Amino acid sequence: MPTAPPAEPSLTNWLIRLPEVFAPWTPEILAQLGVASSTPLGPEYHLIRLADPAPIRQSPASPFLCWNLPIQHSWPCHPPKMENFIEKAAQTLLKKFGPLQPQAIQMGPLQAGAPDRYYKSLASNLRGRTLQLFPNLSGSAPAEAQDPEKPTLFCLVGKEGLFAGMQSPRLSNGFHPGGTKFVSQGAAGTISRAGAKIAEALHYLKLHRPALPEGSHWLELGASPGGMTSELLNRSYRVTALDRAPLDRRLDHHPGLIFTKADVATFHPPAGTVYDALLCDMNGDARHALRQVIRLTQFMRPGGLIVFTLKTPGAATFAAVQDAIRLTLRDASAAPLSLISLTHLTYNRQEFTCFFES
């Protein structure tokens, strides 16, 4: 009797988001994920087919994905030309996902930063109508009030159609559809864009652990000109800021701030000082910066939080950036620091934000 041919592996559909800064390396990233086929949806999203979704979270390419979602329903169409698109889409979502009882419904456009606000408005209106149909769901709670571990119905809509699936915010890597919360960096009185950078990082961190209580003491390395310092102070944290360059004069005499003008490499905290968290966004080689972080963890409480920007200056290839990540994480593990998460956030350039526990 002839042997039956082996069964072909079943393929699943996923929506992934690759930041535009990594666009030149898209073919290498998709290859490492084991993608069977890929369809670009706008400048950052890709609809992919996979035999095994594990590499999305477990491969060396994982840090380059800022968001992901299993696609359990798609409607390829051009919404402006579809009669009663919102009502038809909302009723279909109710029929398919209502019995699954998502904890929340989050919707957004496939091009979040596009100047044409049509799809942002469409996503908002579709969410409003869908919430009317789903019992026991409210649209008033902030996105970060979701349980990071319970499934949410995420939907994205664009000129390519509607794409929806259910997954926990933690597994998708964001409370919002497509990733993290947009934080304006141009508000009046803003010292630098770095303030938005740490605000986004602290929002993201709620996927993994509760926010630090007010009054927690941060040690910030390379703080000048003070954008991140200002954001931490505005959240009622105490900050010891360290840099060879001065801070913005607007931070002078702030009661929650201690500024030390010194080289990070020679800094030693006063006797008896214990920090709750450490922040490092220093420029230059990531492994050199991490050595200073590791040295100063002796002054942190056990389980203290470390927010570290893993920068990759001079890494011009995909392989070189991956090497920088691998070597930095190896050094951190040997320290030992416990990795909470590593991700690419909206305000990162060719760099990554790492969260550790001391």
Image (tube, rainbow, N blue to C red):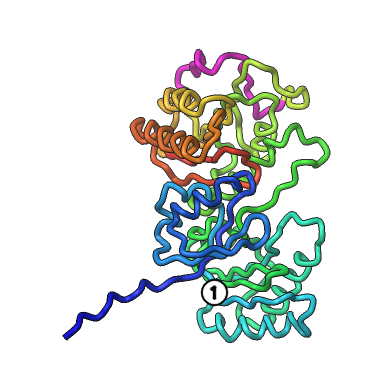
Residue nearest the observer in this picture, 201 or 78:
78
Q: Is residue 27 above or below residue 70?
A: above
Q: Label 1 is placed on what type of residue?
A: Pro
Instruction: Give the side of residue 134 with respect to residue 48, left or right.
Output: right
Q: Is residue 234 above or below residue 45?
A: above
Picture residue at 63% right of the left edge, 84% below the top: 92
Quadrant of residue 120 in the image?
Answer: bottom right
Picture residue at 55% right of the left edge, 46% below the top: 25
- Quadrant of image for the C terminus: top left
Quadrant of residue 106 in the image?
Answer: bottom right
Residue nearest the observer in this picture, 353 or 81:
81
Instruction: Give the side of residue 45 with respect to residue 295, left or right.
Output: right
Picture residue at 51% right of the left edge, 40% below the top: 318
**Callout 1 crowding tier (Cα within 10 Å): few <14, some 14–19, many ≥20:** some
- Does residue 217 show up? no
Secondary structure, mark 1, is loop
Residue highlighted by disc 1:
102
Q: Position of residue 344 (x, y in %)?
A: 56, 45
Q: Position of residue 230 (x, y in %)?
A: 69, 33
Q: Position of residue 157 (x, y in %)?
A: 68, 69
- Residue span colored magenta: 254-272
Say whether residue 186 is magenta: no
Q: Position of residue 175 (x, y in %)?
A: 59, 59
Picture residue at 45% right of the left edge, 37% below the top: 325
- Quadrant of image for the N terminus: bottom left
- Does residue 294 show up? yes
**Residue farthest along the front direction in this orientation:** 2
Instruction: Give the side of residue 323 with respect to residue 176, left or right.
Output: left
Q: Is residue 39 above or below residue 336?
A: below
